[in-house]
Image (cartoon, helix red, strand yellow):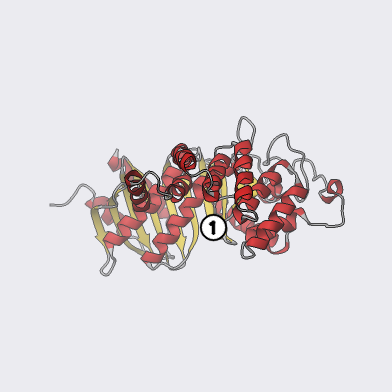
């Protein structure tokens, strides 16, 4: 248990009516303790149903748990309580993004960007959904060549500018994954198809984005400068991460892939991500 | 009297560019044994490296990738490598010029001492 989580847990135990549950829930979410974050958020929301940040927390947790309906309802509740709330518009924008509702996604991103102009991931996402402002939605994204969608979400019609297929060319193998995450661990581009269908990108992003935060903290104290790359070999995959924009890019490949190749794919995906963040194409 | 880890630490630290290596308790970041160059702050290094390794290990498990065998962090002014088993972690701090492929093999080999 980190010091922050311990301190917040103690503060909440001493005063169950305290609003520190919002920070505690978010830290637990970032750490990957989604069930605990859900319980903390639910109890807090029972006591503070009028707090927008409590609904925002529940929406993030629900999104990470794959409960998109609940996430949508909670972010909509945030906007009732706090119209123009940047994080709620951003969250709803990404929800719309995932289901291909580009018009609604664009509107939410616009509103979120108006509230927080410094968020580079919002600007990039907005450019992606508005790539050809005059084109009809059906012609805005052309169907890619056969095979380009192999690493993206099954059952979703492929589109050329679909952010989920951003790294398809670089990856070149359906078993490899690349995800571009924003500073809060949300997936901005890329996808990870689970064996049983569905996109596990949000879960992986939420879990692994915390590693980069921990690395930032360690680097500040160790005097080694900024971290440039993190690579680790796990049981079923080799994973490489690097800072990208204000977030992180991560690449995962089956453990059978040589580490040097995973690094090389990461470098190529970084070039692709930077190009997309800067130009939106 | 030397610790059971003295031999493997000596093997690792003799590689070009290695500034120090330690066996660290993953949970608390406490040094079990270390072989460090003069001027290297082992305590801070151990706690921070163990913390990053622990975070990566938990995140990898939670993301469905399973347990981590080897971890490497490449920074502007050096590298940190870690490999763990059974709550103990071998942490190696090196300059950027280190032959990371070689130390990786030796660190994974060193883990057998923890089994």
Residue A177 seen in this snapshot: no
Left or right: A137 in relation to A258: right
Q: Nearer the viewer, residue A160 or A6?
A: A6
Task: Report the number of discs.
Answer: 1
Q: Residues within 10 Å of mark 1 (few under 14, many from 20)?
A: many
Q: Residue furthest left?
A: B1
Left or right: A278 in relation to A230: right
Q: Nearer the viewer, residue A4 or B30?
A: A4
**Which residue does the numbered mark 1 point to in the structure image?**
A242
Can you give x and y, in whole percent of width and height, for residue A220 in the image?
Answer: 40, 65
Image quadrant where one finds the C terminus of chain B: top left
Residue B55 seen in this snapshot: yes
Q: Residue furthest top?
A: A196
* Residue A125 lies in quadrant: bottom right
Can you give x and y, in whole percent of width and height, for residue A121 in the image?
Answer: 64, 58
Can you give x and y, in whole percent of width and height, for residue A5 in the image?
Answer: 37, 49
* Residue A273 lies in quadrant: bottom right
Q: Is residue A195 above or below residue A241?
A: above
Tell me the subunit letter for badge 1: A
Secondary structure at numbered mark 1: strand
Can you give x and y, in whole percent of width and height, for residue A129 in the image?
Answer: 75, 53
Q: Nearer the viewer, residue A162 or A147?
A: A162
Q: Is residue A193 above or below residue A166?
A: above
Left or right: A215 in relation to A117: left
Tell me which residue sits at (62%, 56%) in the image.
Answer: A86
Tell me which residue sits at (81%, 49%) in the image.
Answer: A141
Q: Nearer the viewer, residue A171 or A198?
A: A198
């Amino acid at each position: 248990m980190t010091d922050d989580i311990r301190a917040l847990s103690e503060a909440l135990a001493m005063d169950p009516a305290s609003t520190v549950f919002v920070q505690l829930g978010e830290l637990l979410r970032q750490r990957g303790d989604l069930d605990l974050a859900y319980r903390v958020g639910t109890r807090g929301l029972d006591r503070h149903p009028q707090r927008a940040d409590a609904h925002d927390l529940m929406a993030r947790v629900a999104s990470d748990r794959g409960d998109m309906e609940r996430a949508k309802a909670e972010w909509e509740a945030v906007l009732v309580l706090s119209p123009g709330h940047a994080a709620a518009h951003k969250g709803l924008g990404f929800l719309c993004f995932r289901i291909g509702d580009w018009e609604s996604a664009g509107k939410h991103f616009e509103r979120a960007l108006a509230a927080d102009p410094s968020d580079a991931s919002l600007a990039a996402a907005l450019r992606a959904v508005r790539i050809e402002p005059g084109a009809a939605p059906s012609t805005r994204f052309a169907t890619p060549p056969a095979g380009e969608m192999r690493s993206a979400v099954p059952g979703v019609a492929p589109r050329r500018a679909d952010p989920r297929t951003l790294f398809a060319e670089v990856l070149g193998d359906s078993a490899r994954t690349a995800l571009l995450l924003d500073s809060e661990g949300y997936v901005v581009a890329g996808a990870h198809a689970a064996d049983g269908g569905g996109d596990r990108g949000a879960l992986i992003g939420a879990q692994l984005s915390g590693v980069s935060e921990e690395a930032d903290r360690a680097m500040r104290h160790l005097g080694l400068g900024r971290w440039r790359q993190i690579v680790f070999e796990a049981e079923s995959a080799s994973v490489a991460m690097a800072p990208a924009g204000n977030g992180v890019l991560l690449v995962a490949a089956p453990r059978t892939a040589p580490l040097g190749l995973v690094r090389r794919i990461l470098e190529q995906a970084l070039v692709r991500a930077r190009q997309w963040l800067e130009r939106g194409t | 009297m030397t610790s059971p880890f003295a031999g493997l630490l000596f093997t690792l630290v003799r590689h070009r560019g290695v500034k120090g290596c330690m066996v660290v308790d993953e949970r608390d970041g406490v040094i079990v044994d270390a072989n460090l160059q003069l001027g290297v702050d082992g305590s801070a290094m151990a706690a921070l490296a163990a913390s990053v390794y622990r975070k990566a290990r938990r995140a990898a498990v939670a993301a469905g990738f399973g347990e981590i065998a080897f971890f490497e962090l490449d920074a502007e002014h050096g590298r940190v490598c870690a490999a763990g088993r059974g709550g103990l972690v071998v942490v190696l701090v090196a300059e950027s010029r280190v032959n990371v492929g070689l130390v990786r093999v030796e660190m994974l080999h060193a883990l057998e001492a923890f089994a």
